[in-house]
């Protein structure tokens, strides 16, 4: 077992973690990033990224994350290929974490950037056609289906918001829900039912995503939840919108979360209720969930971490002077 000590310990290597590392390293905090089981985060499982500022041409998600990692390393970040399995926040700074490898990590500040994962239906064809017609993010991929036929699967706020968003690009949006009423807020339902571009399809689940000869999504196989009858729906794109699961298992009982499991921070900041512990990116943001917002809150976490350390070091200095 090795103990790694740093002024700034970052858990997670998506856009939030890498951005916190870039700012933290440039501020002299010699960050350590513990990368987790998905180095680079969610963007490593997508293809085209067209909305990250700074690139006139379409770029690839894995390439973007490789660049962020290199940039963070270039300015002095240490990357650890490990997954944190335990954290100890009870005694304040310095914070202790233990990796799957058995290694121990000690950080004067802790930045949590563990992200979230979209929930999937888990039916045949779904993973295979990811990025080839099947997506979990209309804001990210809706633009690729301009003028095409799309479907959204789900019945909560996310699904209705995704369907409404897609009407900016498509005149033919089908909302597929397994019940005959929606769970979303009334105001969203009113907007959905007022839209001539959205057709709700009740009491249906997707039992299979089926590819065409071009290797992309061709149609959905649907099952009626009342009669069990099978039918098909031809679409160019399908958006699974049944929610996200933030990676907060580690922090249960240690940091406050909302009813969906997202870490709660002081509004407008990445500060948790423990001084010196910051949360950034999708793990604390169930609203925007974009690479650029994750990077933005990662930057905020590093700037606040720097201020916290300056105050902490000043207090330690005063205490020594007073002895
Ligand atoms: C298919 C797809 C396409 C997308 N397309 C776009 C797009 O085009 N544009 C856009 O802006 N956004 C897009 N998004 C959303 C974007 O990817 C996320 O908003 C962004 O990645 C969130 O960044 P994050 O740093 O908060 O977390 P994530 O990217 O989720 O990264 C979380 C990190 O935490 C690590 N981790 C988790 N638990 C632990 C642990 N216990 N120990 C150590 N590490 C841990 C993981 O390994 C991972 O590295 C897309 C998402 C998906 C799924």
Image: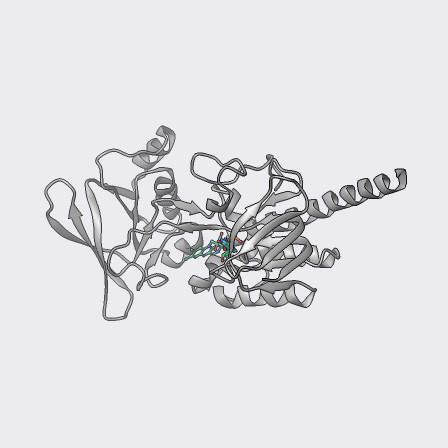
Quarter location, residue 186 = top left
Give residue 280's position: percent from left, percent from top: 57, 47
**Is 57 placed left or right of 244 in the picture?**
right
**Where does the image place residue 114, in percent across and percent down from the top left?**
51, 51
* Res 142 visible: yes
Colouring:
one colour
Q: Quadrant of residue 208?
A: bottom left
| Residue occupying the far front of the picture | 1
Residue at 42% over, 51% down: 117
Res 60 seen here: no
Residue 31 in which image quadrant = bottom right
Q: Position of residue 203 (x, y in %)?
A: 19, 40
Q: Where residue 78 sits: x, y (%)?
A: 64, 64
Indicate whether 274 appears above or below 25.
Answer: above
**Which residue is found at the position 37% from the left and 56% from the top?**
146
Residue nearest the observer in this picture, 315 or 15? 315
From the viewer's perspective, is 96 left or right of 214? Answer: right
Identify whether 220 is placed above or below 187: below
Q: Quadrant of the N terminus?
A: bottom right
| Residue drawn at point x = 48 percent, y = 41 percent | 287
Image point (29%, 65%), residue name? 216
Q: In this rendered view, identify the residue nearer to me: 310 or 183.
A: 310
> Where's the C terminus, which quadrant?
top right
Q: Identify which residue, 94 or 58, lies in the foreground.
A: 94
């Amino acid at each position: 077992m090795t103990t790694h000590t740093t002024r700034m310990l970052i858990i997670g290597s998506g856009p939030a973690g890498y951005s916190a590392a870039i700012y933290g390293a440039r501020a002299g905090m010699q960050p350590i990033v513990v990368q987790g089981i998905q180095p680079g985060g969610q963007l490593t499982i997508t293809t085209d990224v067209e909305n990250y500022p700074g690139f006139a041409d379409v770029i690839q998600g894995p390439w973007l994350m490789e660049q962020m990692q290199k940039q963070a390393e270039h300015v002095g970040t240490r990357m650890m290929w490990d997954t944190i399995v335990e954290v100890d926040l009870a005694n304040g700074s310095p914070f202790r974490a233990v990796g799957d490898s058995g290694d121990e990590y000690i950080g004067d500040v802790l930045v949590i950037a563990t992200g979230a994962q979209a929930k999937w239906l888990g039916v045949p064809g779904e993973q295979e056609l990811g990025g080839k017609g099947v997506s979990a993010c209309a804001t990210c991929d809706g633009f690729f289906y301009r003028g095409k036929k799309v479907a959204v699967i789900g019945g909560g706020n996310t699904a209705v918001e995704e369907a409404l968003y897609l009407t900016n690009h498509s005149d033919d949006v089908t909302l597929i829900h397994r019940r005959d009423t929606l769970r979303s807020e009334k105001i969203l339902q009113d907007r959905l039912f007022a839209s001539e571009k959205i057709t709700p399809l009740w009491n249906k689940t997707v039992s299979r995503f089926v590819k065409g000869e071009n290797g992309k999504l061709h149609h959905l196989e649907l099952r009626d939840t009342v009669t069990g009858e099978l039918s098909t729906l031809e679409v160019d794109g399908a958006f699974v919108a049944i929610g996200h699961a933030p990676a907060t298992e580690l922090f249960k009982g240690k940091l406050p979360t909302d009813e969906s499991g997202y870490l709660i921070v002081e509004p407008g900041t990445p500060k948790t209720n423990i001084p010196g512990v910051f949360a950034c990116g999708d793990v604390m943001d169930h609203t925007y969930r974009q690479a650029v917002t994750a990077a933005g809150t990662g930057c905020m976490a590093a700037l606040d971490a720097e201020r916290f350390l300056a105050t902490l070091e000043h207090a330690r200095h005063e205490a020594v002077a007073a002895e």
